[in-house]
Image (cartoon, rainbow, N blue to C red):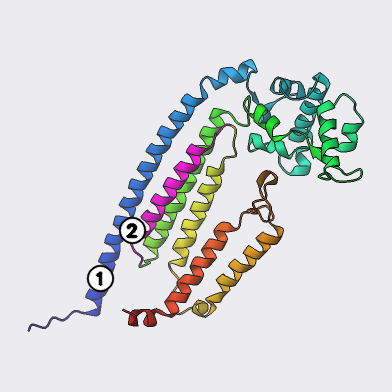
Amino acid sequence: MPITYSTAASRAESARSRERSGRLLELVALVAVAIVLVAGLALLYQAKRLGWGDIQAELAAGRVVNLNAAPAAEKLLPLLREVGANETERRFIADRIYRYLHQDAGARGSGSLEGVGGLARIRVNVAEVRAQRRLENLRARAERLAAAGQSQAGDAATIALLTAEDVATVGSRAVVREPRTFGWLLTASTALFLAGLFAAHLFLRFRGARTDALLLPSIALLSAIGFLTMVSLRDPLRDAPLFLRFAEGTAAGAVLLAVCARLDFQRLPLRKLTWVPLGGAILLSALLIVFGSGPGGSDARVNLFGVQPVEAIRLLVVLFLAGYFANRWEFLRALR
């Protein structure tokens, strides 16, 4: 039987060669995902444009109003033809919407609506409503809520300016951004999405991380599908641009993945802290049950202090399971 010998240098060179081949495969796969993503977004953008019709002409004629660009409260009145009991009430509502968007922007820390649904957050003082007899619908709603015990007591009592039905009616003739703004947001989000993935690839390549060459492209493909879904399911002119937040999260996650790939988890004391992620998941779940709230007054407890911790809970459970089974690897092998 022949015996072959290899030097440490040759073995190191062989390992580097395999790593270079793996990184090249990773780059080619990432480029393929990027091409598919850009092509899909181009098709989606064209489909959205067809659905808008001649939106610019509608905006110019005043039949559709950009809430964030309305120069005066009077420009909002065409949206309120089916809202309010009379002209006085409609002018009152238009004035409060305009004040919320422009005059009260500093107190909120934001001067624009991300989505038409944000109109549901506008509230008015009940005492002010009761003081004006012509605000018939608002007065009647305030009395109904008070009789049902669903409103606050005292001078601080407030009610929503618009009901859910009112918001839906207004939303059919209102937008919060124009097509060119959406195009810019989509371009910036796509660039950020791809920049994070390729930055992770470059980090892994130049730091010599030994990872599966198909791991990052697989994550990129799944994230690209999610990104396309986020763009396609929502109205880009009326709804919040959640695809931008999705792109930010994907870019940050890809970079974090690349950094974590350089850590030697076998030598770190993290293996002894397996139960910490599980404890964090249980704590977040308990806080969500006690202090959680739902969108639009729903009973579903999904929001916790302005964020949705469900994804974090899932990730913590996955980390616990990974550490748990890693610590019992020898036992699991013996079960075979």
- Check residue 214 in the rendering and tell me which mark sits there, or answer none: 2
The amino acid at mark 2 is: Leu
Q: Which mark is residue 279?
A: none
Q: Position of residue 332 (x, y in %)?
A: 37, 79
Q: Please give the range of residues in magenta.
A: 211-237
Q: Residue at position x 70%, y 19% from top?
A: 78
Residue 271 shows up from this direction: yes
Camera-side residue: 157 or 116?
Answer: 157
Q: Position of residue 267 (x, y in %)?
A: 45, 80
Q: Earlier in the sequence, mark 2 or mark 1?
A: 1
Q: Residues under labels 2 and 1: Cα distance?
A: 22 Å
Residue on which the image places disc 1: 13
Of 239 and 7, nearer the camera is 239
Q: Disc 2, disc 1: CB below 8 Å?
A: no
Instruction: Give above or below for 31 relative to 313.
Output: above
Quadrant where the C terminus lies?
Answer: bottom left
Q: Return the x and y of residue 305 as percentages of the image width and height.
A: 69, 55
Q: Is residue 236 inside the magenta stretch?
A: yes
Please, is residue 15 above or below residue 288 in the view? below
Is disc 2 placed on a helix, strand or loop? loop
Q: Mark 2 or mark 1: which is in front? A: 2
